[in-house]
Amino acid sequence: MAQLLRWCNRIVVAHPWKTQLLTTGFLMATSDVIAQTAIEKKEVKDIEPLRVGRFAFLGSCFVAPILRTWYNVLEKTMGAVGRTVGLRKMMVDQLLFTPCFLGCFLTVSGALQFQPWSVIKDKINKEYFEVLKTNYMLWPSAQLITFYVIPLQYRIIFVSFVALLWNTYLASQANQSYNETKIKNFNN
C-alpha cells in the first residue's frame, strides 16, 4: 500500500494538471454510475453510457479546470498559513464561489444534454436553491478540512473523493429533470 501511495504521489507531483483532470472526470463518471444504480435503481445493463460520458466530460473539462484555478486564486490571494486562513477561504468559497459555480454547473449540464434554454432556465429556477441548501450541509466542513489539512496539489483529488457523494446527488438532480423532459417530449 505504501508503495502505491508513493507512486501516486510521484504522478501527482510530476503531472498535477493531468492527474486532476483525469481523476475528477473518472470520479464524476463513477458518481453518475452510482446515481443510476443506487438512487435510480437501474440494472447495470440499463446504465446510460452517454450520460456517464457526459458527466466524465463535465468533470474533466469544466469542473477540474475551474476548481484548479479557483484553489490557486485562493492560495495566492489569501495565503497558505495562519490560524484563520482556512476559515476565511471556506467562507469566500461557500459565499462567493459556490453560488456562481452551481448556477454554471446546472447550465452547462443542461447544455450538454442539449436542453433548450427555456428548460435549463426552468430547472435552475426550480432546483437551484435546493441544491445550494444541500451543498451547505456537506461542503463547509469538507472545505475546512481541505484548506487546513490537505496540501494544495492534493486538494482537487481530495475534493473529488468527497464529491463522489455530492456528485452522485448532483447527477441524480441534473438528470431527473432531463429524464422528465424526455418523457414529456415522448408523450407529446
Image (cartoon, rainbow, N blue to C red):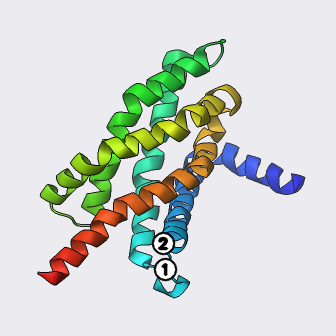
Q: Which residue is mark 1?
A: 42
Tell me the CA gap for discs 1 and 2.
Answer: 6 Å
Amino acid type indicated by mark 1: Lys
Position in image of residue 119 (x %, y %): 17, 59
Q: Where the C terminus falls, by quadrant?
A: bottom left
Q: Note whether 2 is above or below 149 in the view shown.
A: below
| Residue 173 or residue 56, whichever sits in front | 173
Which residue is at a point 45% across and 43% down the rendered structure image?
Answer: 134
Contact? badges 1 and 2 (CB < 8 Å): yes
For mark 2, does the 10 Å Cα neighbourhood hold few (<14), some (14 to 19), or many (20 or more) residues?
A: many
Tag 2's secondary structure?
helix
| Residue 135 or residue 15, whichever sits in front | 135
Position in image of residue 152 (x %, y %): 63, 33
Q: Note whether 160 is above or below 91 in the view shown.
A: below
Q: Can the viewer see residue 57 in this picture?
A: no
Horizontal arrangement in the rendering, residue 35 relative to residue 62 (left or right)? right
Position in image of residue 86 (x %, y %): 60, 21
In the rendering, which numbered label is found on residue 36?
2
Which residue is at a point 41% across and 39% down the rendered structure image?
Answer: 133
Which residue is at a point 56% across and 65% down the rendered structure image?
Answer: 30
Q: Quadrant of residue 150?
A: top right
Q: Can the viewer see residue 12 in this picture?
A: yes
